[in-house]
Amino acid sequence: MPEAATSRNAPPPAREEQFNDLEQQTEAAHLGMWLFLSTEILFFGGLFGAYTIYRVSYPAAFAAASKDLLMWAGAADTAILLVSSFAMAMAVHAAQTDARRALTVFLLLAAGIGGLFLCLHGYEYYKDFAEHHIPGPSFRYEGGKAPANQVQLFFLLYFLMTGLHSLHVTIGIVILTVLAVQSWRGKFSREYYNPVEIAGLYWHFVDIVWVFLFPLLYLIARR
Amino acid sequence: MPTEIVQPKVYLRTFALLLLLLVLTVGANFINLGPFNVAAALTISIAKAALIILFFMEVRYSKPLVWLFASAGFIWLLLLLIFTETDYQTRGWSAQNWRGGTNGQDHVEFNNPASAKP
Amino acid sequence: MSTQIPSASDLAETDFGPPPAKNYLNEETTIRSWLLTTDHKRIGLLYLFTILIFFAIASFAAAMMRLELLTPAGDLVLSQTYNKLFTIHGVLMVWFFLIPSIPTVLGNFLIPLMIGARDLAFPKLNLASWYIFITAGAFTLYAVFAGGVETGWTFYTPLSTKYTNTHVFAMAMGVFISGFSSILTGLNFIVTIHKMRAPGMKWMRLPLFCWSLYATSIIMVLATPVLAVVTMLLAIERLWGVGIFDPALGGDPVLFQHLFWFYSHPAVYIMILPGFGVISELITCFSRKRIFGYEFIAFASMAIAILGFVVWGHHMFLSSQSVYSGMVFSFLSFVIAVPSAIKVFNWTATLYKGSITFETPMLYALGFIGLFTIGGMTGLFVAALATDVHLHDTYFVVAHFHYIMVGGMVLAFMGGLHYWWPKITGRRYPEPLGQLAALVTFIGFNLTFFPQFILGYLGMPRRYHAYPPEWQVWNVLSTAGASILAVGYMMPLGYLIWSLKKGKRAGENPWEATGLEWQTTSPPPKHNFDVTPIVTEEPYAYPLAASDEHLKAEKGRRALEHA
Ligand SMILES: [Cu+2]
């Protein structure tokens, strides 16, 4: 009997007792995630607000400082995150069509490419460190085109914004890896794949943040 | 929560468009558009974000309530940006209008050595 | 239904039978079952217990300050100790009592009951937010006992980042963490109200308490992250030594104020909107009359929540903020008085020709209306650009916001706690003692804070431990009032605990109130309702209609029924 086969592989859908049915549970989880993402927008928003104020106040210093960032690395960061987002979207599709092996693979792929992002960004941080661009007593700026203190302010914002973003990427990688393990153990099915979609929303959001960070931090000055 | 299953070709097209926009934004960095540099960069970013939200995050296929929830955060962020920036943009006005009076202090240049002109 | 209108006090003396054999309180009784519970009712009680501890500590700090101000000289505590006292008072009262008070205690307990749900949408998240709250409290109490902080609850830079060597880092972390508790609570409420309503519970049948908490939750979700980021930046600046508010880098300390008040003005509405919700329930119940202008009250809550986000600059008129920004913020602050006034008018219109009785919750509710009106009107004084130059940072501001926070929110919290006490515990508190406590609180409150309006008008600045002798008489009055207020707070603590064991049994619906929460047993069973209720009518179907016309129609209908 085909039903017996599916019920052996997939555990019964996990409806929590406060919900009447799975649909209610899924919709609630989606709304909850969207609300959480709204808070994330405003969490990053405080930093974007500070960035706006200071960039408008010190356009020359921000342009000069931005030239010291590796634009090609920033572009590669963006491409990497876009590929990872695409893999995540495909993971959701795999879950919807009950392709469990594909789901596991795509989840691992999304997480792995996220790891690549962290490596590349780590390399950029290393370069900043080597060039004494970490704000603080050891900060140096020899360009001479702009006041060093304002350049330092730019780098401070750069580290705060990308640091917070990288923290989000790290959390996302952990979540996706956990989901991949669960998927490999057969936790998800066509009826129940809510966590995959929810994690997907979070992962795409992290991508969106970067889509704004890239031009605002790396592309201020003309080259 | 999407009301239908989105096909992979939709994801693939979205992905291709996103890569195209990335090339565009890097390319625009080599052309000087003057005051429109920032506008161009932000427009491309907003287009990218919209693509991700509508297709990857499947808002395009979701109920109106999801549209509302997805836009709320951005609207509130705009409130924050507009009202704070308004303050910084208008701080200098009074000083310029009434320069020479008792209110000659210019407030907008907070500790900004670069713009401290004689 | 008979034409005789039953009064709530008729039922007060009746002792109903024993409570249901199994309810949420006695189903499991181990400590572990409390600490790992996901039942929204139990989590509400966990919060109640926790915030009362914070309230006690913060009140102690206030008592010390009032004692110091008894004499003009700074003779009881050092000026720095005084700074630490008002910081403790502010931080604990704002983030660890007022903001969580009604939402996490009454909101947690009542929202699922009022909308006919078995629990909140995310019960585990609900428990997690209590643990986050506890962690935040631990950080804050560590800062207090390790030596305190002298920045005031506002943490203004550069004092907080550069010029103080007190425990700002730990306290900022406490506030940062408490924000996440608040965000998760708000998120849970919004999703619950959207998705968990019982069949027939349309939006226009939603109790006004739920409407007001929905509006509150919007603020919690959209404003609190900005508080989180600004306290995070503060903590980083103290830890790292460089920060974006540092003028040495070209940073602007006033930017801190912008981000801080982007949260902290809406937070004022986190503190008062739930109070509005409670008062709407109490006024209509003890007038035995349908609420006047249900839609207006509901939408006024939403209007306040949204408008509340664009008035924050009225805290910064004297901070080098642009005067043009100041004008916009001042104008918008006047605009937001309109929906608040709409609510007051609707409550008074509900009282009009009602069959009013004066049980304890109603006394608190009536006190609320008066005191909130005074607090709101004096808010217009400080929202006006010119008068604020004189009143800024004086005791006038202190008196103004205490009329809102204590005269408003605390009275609403006490009123709500008394009103739903029978539902929460299954027991009744002693009514005469309750009425006396409400009266003592009202008198004590006014004696404490009305003199402060005068002091502020005379120019006494806030946050100083010494003052010129000619202001002593008003300060003595205020301190005397504070001791009466303390009695008003202590009394309920005593008789409510007493009533847990000795109070009369409440029965399902001791106030003859409408609303789903009164249709289940007291205390309710673990999953609230044995059968999911089906809602077929408006929330406030009390015997008296909202207007004469309705009343006539109702009489006609009854006449027909009798014929
Ligand atoms: Cu305010």
Image (tube, coloured by chain):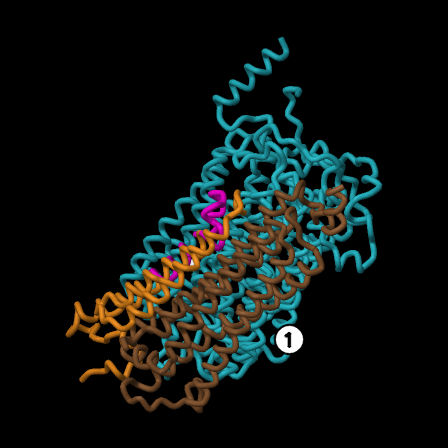
> Which residue: 77% across, 34% down?
C14
Q: Indicate the colour of chain B.
A: orange
Q: Nearer the viewer, residue C512 or C538?
A: C538
Labels in figure, total: 1
Where disc 1 sits, the SS reads helix
Residue under label 1, please give it: C142
Q: Residue A68 in magenta?
A: no
Q: Nearer the viewer, residue C474 or C221?
A: C221
Q: Is residue C462 visible?
A: yes
Colour brown belongs to chain: A
Task: Left or right? Give the position of C383 relative to C210.
Answer: left
* Residue C563: image location, x then y, percent: 62, 8
Quadrant of the rendering where the N terminus of chain C is positioned: top right
* Residue A207: image location, x then y, percent: 47, 64
- B113 versus C26 height, above or below: below
Q: What's drawn in magenta, residue-wise?
A: B55-83
Q: Is mark 1 within 8 Å of ligand 1?
A: no
* Residue C255: image location, x then y, percent: 38, 70
> Which residue: 45% across, 59% down?
C265
Q: Quadrant of residue C426?
A: top right
Colour cyan belongs to chain: C
> Which residue: 67% across, 48% down?
C109
Amino acid at the residue labelled 1: Tyr
